[in-house]
Structures are given as C-alpha cells and as structure tokens.
Image: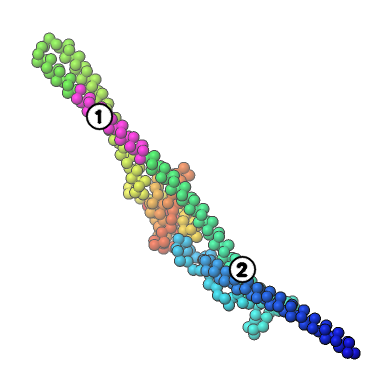
Amino acid sequence: MAKLLKVLVVLLLILSAVALAIEIVLTQQREELKGRNTLLTRGALHVSKTLEVIPADTNVDLAMRELPRLQLNDEMFKHFYQVGADGKKIVVNGKSKTDGEGTLDSVLKEISVRADLQFIRLNDTRGNLESTRVTLSETSNTLVSTIAELNQTKDKLKETENNLAQARQDIAQKAEQIADLTAKNEGLTADVERKKEEIAKLGDKLSDMEGKIEATKRYIEKLQKDLDACLRGPSDDQSPGLKGQVVVVNTNWNFVVIDVLPDVQLVPMTELRVQREDKLVGKVRVSEVLRDRHFAFGEILSDWQQLPVAKGDNVFY
C-alpha cells in the first residue's frame, strides 16, 4: 500500500510539473496573441483614418483635401462574437455567431469595402490626370508651333519691307536720272523712254510687293488672333443662339457631352446656357472640342445650376 502511495505521489508530481510547463507555454502564447491583437487593432485604426467616406449618391469635389474619414475606435475591435441586447452571445444552429453588426468581422469588412472604393477612385483620378496631361501637352505643342510660324512670317514681312524700301529708292534714283537727262538734252528721249519703262516695271514690282505685304499682314493678324485665342481662352465674338444638345451627363465627375450643330464653331473656356423648354437649367463651361466629330465636353457650373442637367437639354450661347 505504501509503495502504491509513493507511486501515486511521484505521478502527481510529474503531472504537476507537466501542467506547470504547459501553463507557462500557454501563458507565453496568450501574451503573444494578445500583443498581436493589439498591434493589429492599432494598425487597422491607423489605416481607417486614411479611408474616405463618400456616399455613392452624393456629388463631392474630390479635389478637396479634407474629406470625411472612416471613424473607428478600440471598442469596435473587442467583440469577436455577436452579442444581443441582453449581453449574451447570439447562437445560430448551435454555434455562436461571429458576423453581423457589432462584430470584428463587420468592422474589417467595412475597412475592406472603403479601401476598395478609395482604390477605384484613385485609379479614376489617375486616368483623368493622364488625359489632362495629354491634352495640355497637345495644346502646348500647338502654341509653340503657332508662335514659331508667326515669328517666321514676321521675318518674311521684314525682308519684304526691306525689298520694298530698296525698290522705292531705285524708283527715286531713276526718276532723278530721268529729270537730269531731260534737262540736259532733249535728244536723249529714247533713253528717257527706256527709263520710263524701267520705272513702269519697278512700279509693277512695287504694286506686287505692296499686295504681298498686305496679304502677309492679314495672315499675321490671323495668326495673332489664333495665338490670342490660345492664350486668352474663348472668343468674345461668339454669335448668340442654339449651339447643340446635351447627350451625356456624368454627375459624379460633374461634366456633360454636347452634340454640337454642324455649322457651330466652339472654343474652350466658352460658357453656355443650358435650357429645358423655357426654363434655365444652369450653365456649363466648354473644356474641350472635338471638331471632327462635332462633340464638346463641358464642366457643369454649380453656381448657376437651377435644375439637374439632363440628356436632351438644349445649349445656347
């Protein structure tokens, strides 16, 4: 009997040592899991502060620096199981429910959904920025080309004016020579006639040069107007009347696509009225014109908006 007791005592001591070792290991693992949970919670809270909360049916200026952010706190990460109004876990089919409102699963899903939406908006913004960059680059190249052509034309005009001045000097010299020859000897009539012919030819050349100068000046004026239009924006002499009809409306990005009438010439930065029958809907500003397709893109001016712009609305200047 005594031997049996000794064996039991030794067995209990061994089991106690094993239990103590297991307790130490479990305590370390519990502390590690607790630390991981704390770090994950802090990380999720930090990430949530960078996520924007923009309702899908609301027009928001994405250029704003301060947009509503996702608001979370530590308490939202503490409930792994869904708890009812009585403070007890909700059990479904014999298992405690781990999803639904108020659970850690719902908070993580909210963060995931907001992150996906923000990623989509970021990609859309990247696309628009690239399109704007290409348009700006094309406009810049056109402006540089126009300036270069204008400078070349000015150089040609200066050269033509110099030739004209020289021709006038030649005419004056020939006229003086004719006067001297006439005064000295009437017998030099043949020479005078020859000089007159030269004068006539020089006169024709002078007239031709003057015509070229006038044409060049008109061309320079046209180039200057084109350059001013590029630098200034919309033309001030736009004729009033119907310009087209709205065919596409994008309220999220606040722009419209206008079907421009075939005989209408629009330029960027022109502000147009939008009407529905006899009612003023608002105004749009032309941002880009596709002349070969008779389409124009316009920005909706919110300060003038009386009614939501819709497909089929007429556009006037």
| Residue at far left of view | 183
Q: Horizontally, is 245 left or right of 146 in the view?
A: right
Q: Residue at x 41, y 45 (%)?
A: 140
Q: Quadrant of residue 98?
A: bottom right
User: Start and end of the magenta stretch?
Assistant: 147-170
Circle 1: residue type: Asn
Mostly what secondary structure, the magenta segment?
helix
Q: Quadrant of the N terminus?
A: bottom right
Residue 245 screen position, x and y as percent: 45, 52
Q: Horizontally, is 106 left or right of 12 in the view?
A: left
Q: Horizontally, is 192 left or right of 244 in the view?
A: left
| Residue at far bottom of view | 1
Location of residue 294 with respect to 307 vertically, above or below: above
**Residue bearing the label numbered 2:** 109
Q: Horizontally, is 45 left or right of 282 in the view?
A: right
Q: Residues within 10 Å of mark 1 (few under 14, many from 20)?
A: few
Secondary structure beneath disc 2?
helix
Secondary structure beneath disc 1?
helix
Circle 2: residue type: Lys
**Residue bearing the label numbered 1:** 162
Depth check: give the residue in front, 148 or 276.
148
Residue 137 screen position, x and y as percent: 44, 46
Q: Residues within 10 Å of mark 2 (few under 14, many from 20)?
A: few
Does the magenta run of residues contain 95?
Answer: no
Q: Residue at x 82, y 84 (%)?
A: 10
Q: What's the distance in space between the residues labelled 1 and 2, CA to CA?
A: 79 Å
Location of residue 285 with respect to 14 vertically, above or below: above
Residue 63 screen position, x and y as percent: 45, 60
Q: Residue at x 47, y 66 (%)?
A: 67
Does the magenta run of residues contain 150?
Answer: yes
Residue 80 screen position, x and y as percent: 65, 75
